[in-house]
Image: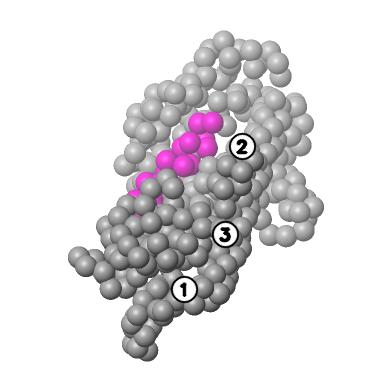
Amino acid sequence: MDQTYQQERRPTVLVVDDAPENLSLVRGLLKDHYRTLLANSGATALEIAHSSDKPDVILLDVMMPEMDGYQVCSRLKSGPPTADIPIIFLTARSEVEDEQMGFKLGAVDYITKPISPPILLARVHTHLTLKAAADFLRDKNAFLESEVQRRTEEISTIQDVTIMAMASLAETRDNETGNHIRRTQNYVQALAMQLCESGKFLNYLSKEQIKVLYKSAPLHDIGKVGIPDKILLKPGKLTPEEFEIMKMHTTLGRDAIVASEKLLGSPNSFLQCAREIAYSHQEKWDGSGYPEGLKGDSIPISARLMAVADVYDALISRRVYKEPMPHEKAVDIIKKGRGSHFDPEMVDAFLAIDTVFYSIAQRYADSQEAVQQKARAV
């Protein structure tokens, strides 16, 4: 049993030659050191090389009928399953041009006949050793890539959980329900994808950036955790003084995210996007918004996207102090805000997919019971 195991563990050498005496000769030289497979034609060699019993190295004659060694080599090097198998040419053709052709096709060595046993064994040993090292590195790289992918996914999951935990913290202090977070992040994603498909903001709206926007959106109202309950939860209209305090949620949100960025000690695209949204989603296209009164293109694109998403959701959502507005009326209000409250490009994109917004709103709709429970909780 141990002898059979050791035999299977030995490297496998495929010998390809149309002359039986040559096959017998080479096999005799190798049999005490390696497991050998024999092929008397190029077609048979290709079949063996592509089988589950793939050789570790191939000794290949050049002058064979139907398919010569150069053609076999070219076929073997053309595809991933066999491209990494080292090929050593064994041939009576000793011209420099013949060797150049062999190496050009991807062979690792070129041994001329008559064969010198010590040279043959040394060359085979060398190339098997090199192949083993290359296989080890390739497997190691594959393992490392797999580990990097696993860790990246793990970090992404931790990031997602942290985001939702922070967003939920803000939600516990507000009249909003958890579904508001899900709706707005999906609105932002849908709006960004529509703009991208329309050829707008292509320098900004990459596939990766849209993912960042989706993840960042739930933190748009994180600053509300710092607003006093008597103002944040007031069911009626705020006084001018109260509204000034309420407006501070944008600055508080930005400052909290800036503090997180400082802890990381390096730039972070996700936190930058979250900071822009938290700080500037209440800005208006005509400059009448807050906290800085930014106007037009000076408002970050991320915040312009959130402005549409946040207002639409506020309009169509049920609250203890108001009934939900019909979708059509909410669409009309946003349409009328084109060029004043909202970026015209954002509104045009919204109008093109307003039914998608409606579908998202229906999918994550708040029940009346959930709204009432939320009201009792706060």
Residue 267 visible in the picture: yes
Query: Which of disc 2 and disc 1 is earlier in sequence?
Result: 2
| Image: 7 above or below 115 | above
- Magenta segment includes 219: no
Q: Secondary structure at mark 1?
A: loop
How much space separates mark 2 and mark 3, taking CA atoms?
18 Å
* Residue 200 figure quarter: bottom left
Quadrant of the image containing the N terminus: top right
Q: Magenta part mainly helix, strand or loop?
A: helix
Residue 297 visible in the picture: no
Residue that sits furthest to the right in the current view: 263
Q: Which mark is residue 33?
A: 3
Q: Which mark is residue 1?
A: 2
- Find out whether the residues at labels 2 and 3 contact each other: C-beta distance under 8 Å: no
Residue that sits furthest to the top in the current view: 369
- Label 3 sits on what residue type? His
Residue at the (38%, 48%) spot, across then down: 51
Tell me residue 260's x, y (percent): 75, 49
Residue at the (36%, 76%) spot, across then down: 91
Mark 1 lies on residue: 108
Tell me residue 320's x, y (percent): 58, 16
Residue at the (28%, 60%) spot, across then down: 41
| Image: 228 above or below 52 | above
- Find out whether the residues at labels 1 and 3 contact each other: C-beta distance under 8 Å: no
Q: Secondary structure at mark 3?
A: loop
How much space separates mark 1 and mark 3, taking CA atoms?
20 Å
- Label 1 sits on what residue type? Val
Which residues are drawn in magenta?
182-201
Quadrant of the image containing the C terminus: top right
Nearest the viewer among 256 and 35 is: 35
